[in-house]
Image (cartoon, rainbow, N blue to C red):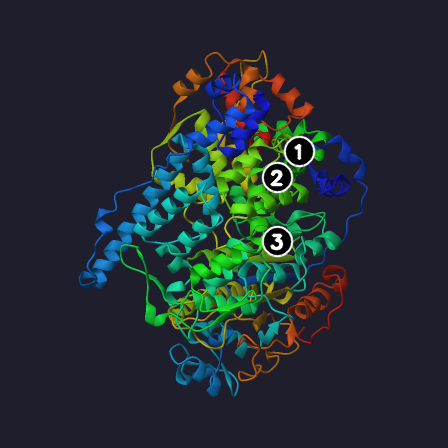
């Protein structure tokens, strides 16, 4: 497979590739590389933290103090889970499954403060990431975290709460404008009685379930939640909506209607996510110029991608949260049920500055070398000397791993691997004017370019 | 963004040392004049329950619809014969007593949308409910009447759709000092110095370069001005009050900003509404109180108008979780000392004649408020900004 295409595929299906991957791939056909992505994602390794203290709690023991104690512990566990998730993204062999899990977490957006529910939910996303979309929605609708988040817990016979029903159609399955207010009211009744136990297991409270007839998308019957999901799946708009969203995330933010319709026809047959993704990665148009290096990395894509080039150990967990927060994407903590908008919405005056500065903050003591060729003095030392430089983030870069990865690589190889977008002549000229004696410094320089923000 | 569009936007860079050569040709664009009156928009995000904010304390339908969460008559800060303030809004009630507050009831728009995102987009773009606009109404104001990103500032880490225009965006500046320091890296400046036309052909990448250039210039200007302002006023210690404190500093510095934008989130009270909403209203009122005092001390209150809105109100009938679901029409607060009609601008709509969802029926279009503010306060042609004509109101 040609290196450019390979790097594009791995930028989208994962978080970039290593020198070793690039060398190995050169002997494989494109189809073999795509197969490799799916073969390695056959396995599903759940992401777990120790939640023993939260299981099998007796309701009777729950006085106010115990509850507060548990809540505090749970908040800390969720932080640990956040860190473990990022580590997973950096190190997992199940590349595509993990990338898809991240995608689905911003589709079936959910937030909770109970670690048990958070963990179950996250692993449900992981388990279904490449499975059947219908089964996926049904599983999500029965997750404790979701039942809480969108108030299905409070959705009762004669007193329906429409929150879940509305978002099910607007955000999870159909998109705005493809249903009526009546559809929402009727389907909310079908989800009445949804609940969960303290371990997060799904259960229905039959006496709170509305057994009456509901009329939904022209059908009438005593529907339950799964029936509603099945009826929505019969709408081709559902397949179209999901394909559009996947296209925007994995291919291009600007929809090509023809390509999405092609995907819709494929997906509508069986709602098989794996088949859909295979189809995309095997399409010629996936590799066309307009789709390569034209997507703005999400903060997590940026952070994980950097880590794959230079592994980093943060001294304090707190710093990892701080970076996520400042860049505008804290895992497990989406802004609202619509999730992060992505694309240009990641970028404003503040985030662009931080993004460009981040490699030097993490890897170079907040300095980017501007030493011209042939000069020994750094002319900008004065600037950097000004003001107290207290180290904002305490991190240890593993440069040995970097040196090892790029041992036999040329400066050109490094550039090719790190910068997928087309470098402008001007920027190229400037880069060439800089001293390229240190691979490390060159790496930081490349990562500090706007072009590195693209994947 | 097409190429021509981008070129226009890049004229922002003209104040910089490292003006890309292609931009120079555009330098002769005449600067549009910026007046001195300021508008501060505050969004209560999540859908504030207007009925428990301004309470109809003599209304049986209100109490019957909300057996568990209605605010009892004796807890209300009574203002008129049938409307009063939630007790957490005491500072706001004082502004009312001083004639510095106008409450406009039943504000909404035809065919209301009850999704947070869509409703927020509608309010921020001033669109019809079936119309999808890519620019915010403040962004369009900038397109027609602005010169620089800092003519409209959002006090936040990121920029809302409201401040995004076709040819120029506002700027998000939560902390002017940090923004400035970050923008002054020599490596960035060198990269920008070598910046060339071909980036323009690349949609997203061009946007990154453009944002970098505009940010550097604006960050410097905002910081330089910001440093000149001082304030003795004490503010409560929370993020919302910090936003207003920064706003006051920027207003008092004489920065050429016409519109400030800030928000307070968390109003999506599907459950346990009383305590949550109460806390939020208190945070809101105390913050605004300090802000108004600060402006008064510095003599800038005369020229500042504060408009508070939420993307929708909530269902009249409470739900089973002692909360309320998404509704439609709600109230808007106008704060200033140039108000023509002080107190309640209009009566609360009927609580028995509701729409099909059981929500209040609107009778004031929110775009009429925008039109009034644009025309009577910011002295610009509202139709150019709102793309069509809306009846103006009579509050300023």
In the image, residue A233 above or below residue B2: below
Quarter residue B273 falls in: bottom left
Q: Residues within 10 Å of mark 1 (few under 14, many from 20)?
A: some
Along the line of sight, which residue is nearer the eye, A58 or B55? A58
Between tags 2 and 3, which lies in front? 2
Measure the alpha-carbon separation of dots 1 and 3.
26 Å
Chain ID of residue with mark 1: A
Measure the alpha-carbon separation of dots 1 and 2.
8 Å
Q: Residues within 10 Å of mark 2 (few under 14, many from 20)?
A: many
In the image, residue B287 above or below residue B87: above
Chain ID of residue with mark 3: B
Residues under numbered marks 2 and 3 in contact, where contact means CB atoms less than 8 Å apart: no
Q: Quadrant of the C terminus of chain B?
A: bottom right
> What is the number of the mark on residue A290?
1
Mark 1 element type? helix
Residue at 25 percent of width and 54 percent of height: A70
Residue at 35 percent of width and 38 percent of height: A84
Tags 1 and 3 both on a single chain: no
The mark nearer the N terminus, 1 or 2, is 2
Mark 3 element type? helix
Along the line of sight, which residue is nearer the eye, B25 or B247? B25
Tag 2 residue = A252
Quarter residue A455 falls in: top right
Tag 3 residue = B161
Give x and y (percent) for residue A225.
Answer: 43, 61
Measure the alpha-carbon separation of dots 2 and 3.
21 Å
> What is the number of the mark on residue A148?
none
Give x and y (percent) for residue B74.
Answer: 40, 84
Q: Residue furthest left?
A: A61
């Amino acid at each position: 497979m040609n290196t450019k295409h390979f790097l594009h595929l791995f930028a989208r299906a994962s978080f970039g590739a290593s020198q070793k991957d690039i060398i190995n791939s050169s002997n494989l056909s494109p189809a073999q590389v795509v197969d490799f992505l799916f073969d390695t994602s056959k396995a599903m390794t759940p992401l777990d933290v120790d939640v023993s203290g939260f299981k099998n709690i007796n309701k009777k023991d729950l006085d106010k103090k115990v509850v507060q104690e548990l809540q505090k512990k749970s908040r800390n566990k969720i932080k640990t889970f956040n860190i473990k998730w990022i580590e997973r993204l950096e190190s997992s062999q199940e590349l595509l499954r993990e990338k898809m899990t991240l995608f689905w977490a911003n589709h079936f957006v959910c937030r909770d403060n109970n670690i048990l529910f958070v963990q179950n939910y996250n692993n449900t996303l992981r388990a279904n990431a490449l499975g059947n979309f219908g089964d996926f929605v049904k599983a999500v609708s029965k997750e404790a975290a979701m039942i809480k988040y969108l108030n299905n817990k409070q959705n009762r016979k004669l007193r329906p709460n429409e929150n879940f029903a509305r978002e099910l159609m607007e955000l999870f399955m159909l998109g705005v404008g493809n249903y009526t207010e009546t559809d929402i009211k009727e389907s909310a009744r079908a989800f009445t009685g949804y609940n969960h136990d303290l371990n997060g297991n799904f259960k229905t409270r039959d006496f709170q379930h509305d057994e009456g007839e509901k009329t939904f998308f022209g059908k009438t019957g005593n529907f339950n939640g799964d029936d509603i999901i099945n009826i929505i799946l019969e709408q081709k708009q559902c397949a179209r909506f999901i394909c559009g969203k996947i296209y925007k995330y994995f291919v291009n933010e600007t929809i090509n209607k023809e390509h999405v319709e092609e995907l819709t026809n494929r997906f509508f047959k069986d709602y098989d996510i794996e088949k859909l993704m295979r189809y995309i990665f095997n399409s010629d148009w996936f590799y066309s110029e307009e789709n390569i290096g034209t997507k703005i990395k999400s903060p997590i894509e940026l952070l994980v991608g950097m880590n794959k080039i230079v592994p980093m150990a943060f001294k304090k967990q707190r710093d990892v949260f701080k970076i996520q927060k400042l860049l505008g994407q804290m895992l497990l903590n989406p802004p609202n049920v619509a999730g992060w908008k992505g694309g240009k919405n990641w970028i404003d005056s503040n985030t662009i500055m931080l993004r460009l500065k981040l490699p030097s903050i993490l890897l170079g003591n907040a300095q980017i070398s501007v030493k011209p060729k042939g000069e020994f003095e750094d002319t900008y030392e004065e600037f950097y000397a000004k003001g107290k430089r207290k180290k904002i983030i305490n991190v240890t870069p593993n440069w040995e791993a970097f040196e090892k990865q790029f041992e036999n690589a040329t400066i050109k190889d490094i550039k090719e691997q790190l910068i997928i977008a087309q470098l402008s002549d001007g920027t190229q000229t400037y880069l060439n004017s800089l001293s390229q004696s240190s691979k490390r410094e060159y790496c930081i320089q490349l990562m500090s370019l706007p072009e590195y923000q693209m994947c | 963004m097409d190429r021509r569009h981008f070129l226009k936007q890049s004229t922002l860079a003209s104040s910089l040392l490292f003006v890309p050569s292609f931009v120079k040709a555009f330098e002769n664009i005449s600067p549009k004049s910026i007046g001195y009156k300021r508008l501060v928009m505050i969004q209560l995000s999540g859908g504030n329950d207007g009925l428990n904010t301004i309470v109809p304390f003599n209304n049986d339908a209100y109490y019957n619809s909300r057996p568990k969460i209605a605010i009892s008559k004796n807890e209300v800060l009574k203002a008129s014969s049938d409307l009063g303030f939630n007790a957490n809004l005491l500072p706001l009630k004082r502004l009312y007593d001083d004639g510095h507050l106008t409450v406009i009831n039943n504000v909404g728009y035809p065919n209301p949308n009850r999704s947070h995102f869509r409703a927020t987009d509608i309010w921020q773009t001033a669109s019809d409910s079936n119309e999808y606009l890519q620019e915010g109404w403040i962004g369009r104001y900038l397109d027609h009447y602005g010169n620089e990103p800092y003519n409209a500032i959002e006090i936040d880490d990121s920029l809302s759709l409201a401040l995004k225009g076709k040819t120029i965006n506002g700027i998000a500046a939560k902390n002017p000092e940090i923004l400035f320091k970050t923008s002054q890296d020599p490596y960035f400046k060198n990269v920008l110095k070598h910046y060339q036309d071909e980036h323009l052909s690349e949609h997203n990448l061009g946007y990154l370069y453009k944002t970098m250039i505009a940010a550097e210039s604006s960050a410097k200007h905002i910081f330089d001005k910001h440093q000149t302002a001082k304030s003795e006023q004490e503010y409560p210690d929370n993020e919302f009050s910090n936003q207003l404190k920064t706003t006051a500093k920027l207003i008092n510095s004489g920065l050429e900003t016409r519109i400030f934008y800030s928000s307070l989130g968390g109003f999506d009270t599907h459950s346990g509404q009383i305590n949550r909403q109460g806390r939020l209203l208190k945070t809101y009122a105390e913050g605004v109180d300090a802000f108004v005092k600060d402006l008064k001390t510095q003599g800038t209150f005369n020229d500042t108008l504060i408009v508070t809105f939420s993307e929708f109100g909530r269902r009249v009938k409470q739900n089973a979780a002692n909360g309320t679901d998404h509704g439609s029409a709600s109230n808007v607060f106008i704060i200033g000392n140039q108000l023509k009609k002080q107190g309640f601008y209009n009566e609360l709509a009927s609580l028995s004649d509701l729409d099909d969802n059981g929500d209040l029926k609107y009778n004031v279009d929110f775009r009429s408020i925008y039109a009034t503010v644009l025309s009577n306060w910011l002295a610009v042609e509202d139709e150019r900004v709102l793309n069509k004509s809306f009846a103006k109101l009579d509050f300023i």
